[in-house]
Amino acid sequence: MRKGQYRFVTGFLFVPVALYLIFVIWPYIQTFGYSLTDWKGESQTFKFVGLDNYRALLHDDVFKEAIWHNLLFLVFIPVITILLALFFAFMVNAGGRSKAGGVQGVAGSGFYKIVYFFPQVLSLAILAVLFNAVYRSDGGGLLNGFLIKLHLVDVNNPVEWLNEPNVVLWALMAVVVWHGVGFYLVLFSAAMQSIPRDIYEAALIDGANRSQSFFRITLPLLWETVQTAWVYLGIIAMDMFVLVSSMTSNMGAYGGGPDHGSDVMSTVMMRNFLYFGKSGYACAMGVVMLLLTLVLSVVTLRATRRERIEF
Amino acid sequence: MGSTSAENNRSNGVGRRDLIKRSAALGLISVPTMSFLSACASGGGDDSSSDDSTKGTTSKSNPFGVKKGSTLDVVVFKGGYGDDYAKAWEANFKTKIGVSSTHTGTQEITGKLQPRFNAGNPPDIVDDSGAQQIKIDVLYKNGQLLDLSPVLDAPAIDDPTKKVRDLLIPGTLDPGVQEGKVVALNYIYTVWGLWYSGKLFKDKGWTPPKTWDEFIAICQKAKAAGIGGLAHQGKYPYYINVAIMDLIAKKGGIDAVKAIDNLDPKAFVGSAAAQAGVEAIYEVVEKGLLMPGTNGLTHTESQTRWNQYKAAFITCGSWLENEQLKLTPTDFDMKFLPMPLLADSKMPFEAIRAGSGEPFIIPAKAKNLPGAKEFMRHMLSKEWSTLFAKEANSLTILKDGVDSSVTLRPGTQSTVEASKAAGANTFRFLYPDWYSEMDTSIQNASNELMAKRIQPKEWLKRCQAAVDKQAKDPASKKNVHS
């Protein structure tokens, strides 16, 4: 590099880093500061209360239940989405019948690649409206209407998908998985395409079937991408604000489902911040969310670390 | 794939990693300096309220000293009543007083105004309502609300010999009282109860019920005819909760209402009225007389179904007609019905939950306080009240506030008749405006009750627990329903 290049490069980096520090890092620091007060959100009069908010959090059953729901999402959403995306990506890239020309995807894979990405194009707000109509609790909902026509559901007793505590979390999970599979399909597809075909062909010659090709060749070579996908999906699972607040019944504000059955940390936090006016308390929740997400990300990255394979 | 060159420290320069580390260190030092200068949430906003630019001279016709040519920042919730009435007011205000207004009609009151309140530059007058309402008790605790007594004690526009507050329907100011001061003007005179279609009842030959047994009978006839009995807006338990609380109020009388508002230890558990009320509603659930699926529907979904003759009754307040204006069939003949009476009730059948809704507030730190006060004084005049009735199909808290030249729609007309029949037999719960958390817990319990996941006994226990929890807060002693 040439002389004076430090200044050149740093000069370009200055503005983006500054923006990041002002709009992302500084609010984090402020949140931590507010969590030590009894700020009520609508003015600047507040008192310093130390760790009272955190002590109160330890006894807050609603928040603890919300953490549990987030952990449930954290376990199931990445697993289901990644498995489906891997399966589809494999099918679309290397799952076709082996012909003389070598490894290829199933018939129509070009079509599938495009169509499976469509859900990702929709914004979460549109998804909420769409699935509200699908899960609508009377005969006018897509699911209920369909099941009533098949006589699997009594027309006088339709299933209230989003109002049943045992079903609501799975219903929300289905929406997230439906939305995300397309994106991760494309991600894994791109990664798979960088795997040289000769490896697959060599395996085919040795008599490997589809599942052996997948587990012995594809998955190990894709591991870094899967790891990244896991962290992204984990972050989505720790958030879930948009879907919960717009699809589930109101616990005062911001949804939360039947009897807090679908409350997540972000909705409990917003409800306390804006609706109940306990903004200092809500900031303490925010700090706990931050720590939890950080710890989980680090643990996930460490636990799934493997040797990097070069090819 | 392959290994990266980020770490390589080649002799002829610096590696990527190092450069980023060094730039980050540089940035970390310099940016906090900048950010301390930038406006942050804790930045002290300067107190520039009520500066001279909005102060004019006071006179008999200008008791607050509004300055001609100043501007008024008006924010209005654009919900069931729309916001055309506010635009009509602003136009009138401009011609009469010479103050032009900036108008914002929105559903995101919290989204748009919480940052403004926090930074100390709120609007001049706000219609703070809707799902995103900033709760009045929260604003009050933050010191953001102006005490409205100067407006209420000023001479009324229609009769300068009387005070503004003397021309209002009695009791309508109470919901806006926090710790003894009127800080919110609940402008719209609302009644709550059941609604039905006059046309449907005529076609089926049903008479509107006066007692609870008659109500159950009609619901059963409806179910036999393939129509749901009672519909409610399940996703927002607020609505069915109003029905339950109204049954309790009518059965137990005003004492039962005050017991709940004043956080009595026997407000729910140990109250015969509360038990009778919740068991009556549970009877509807048990006998399968709810419109199928109603427990999960939003307000527009359930109300539209009701408009499509899929349910006989629906719970709601008198904004219903305006909200469903575009969807109601022209011959629907919407009619209001007070809650049918349980046996041995202390209040008569005509008694209704009536009161004022749609709180208008003047922020304490508003820039044009004289303008805001004058605007509110005009709201309580017959001219503006009639403008409101014309645009929003609803009544205001002004006595005889609607000019007789205006014809009202059937739903609104039936509420006028119901109010006349009720006379002095109106009641109102005050706790929802005082205690948001308690209100949320009670609504939550009602949602569980309607879904048959808890029984009436458990509902009473949960509500009592919410009351007892709120009673532990010493500040609750300042809120008294006398």
Image (cartoon, rainbow, N blue to C red):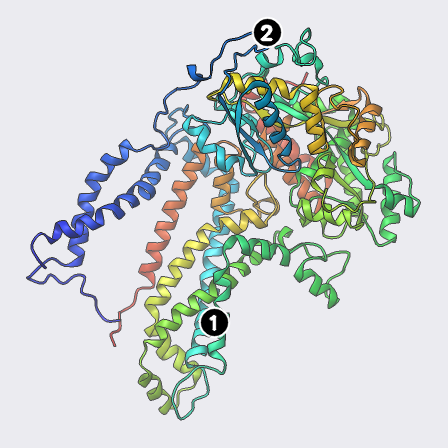
Q: Residue at x 53, y 27 (%)?
A: B101
Could you tell whether B397 is left or right of A78 in the image? Answer: right
Q: Type of residue at label 1?
A: Ile
Residue B443: which quarter of the image?
top right
Question: Relative to B149, is B203 above or below?
Answer: below
Q: Give how far across and how far down residue A166 sits, in percent.
A: 61, 55
Residue A294 or residue A271, whichever sits in front: A271
Disc 2 is attached to a residue of which chain? Answer: B
Q: Residues within 10 Å of mark 1 (few under 14, many from 20)?
A: few
Residue A149 or residue B481, whichever sits in front: A149
Q: Residue at x 77, y 47 (%)?
A: B307
Q: Give how far across and how far down residue A194 sits, in percent.
A: 32, 76
Circle 2 residue: B60
Residue B246: which quarter of the image?
top right
Q: Give how far across and how far down residue A178 sits, in percent.
A: 52, 63
Q: Is residue B45 visible?
A: yes
Could you tell whether B26 is left or right of A127 in the image? Answer: left
Q: Is residue B453 visible?
A: no
Label placed on residue A114: 1
Q: Residue most toward the bottom? A: A100
Q: Type of residue at label 2?
A: Lys
Q: Residue most toward the right? A: B205
Question: Relative to B143, is B341 above or below?
Answer: below
Q: Residue at x 54, y 12 (%)?
A: B64
Q: Secondary structure at mark 1?
A: helix
Q: Give how far across and how far down residue B448 sits, in percent.
A: 67, 44
Q: CA distance from mark 2 to mark 1?
A: 73 Å
Residue B295 or residue B51, whichever sits in front: B51
Could you tell whether B105 is left or right of B260 in the image? Answer: left
Disc 1 is attached to a residue of which chain? Answer: A
Residue A251 or residue B269, whichever sits in front: A251
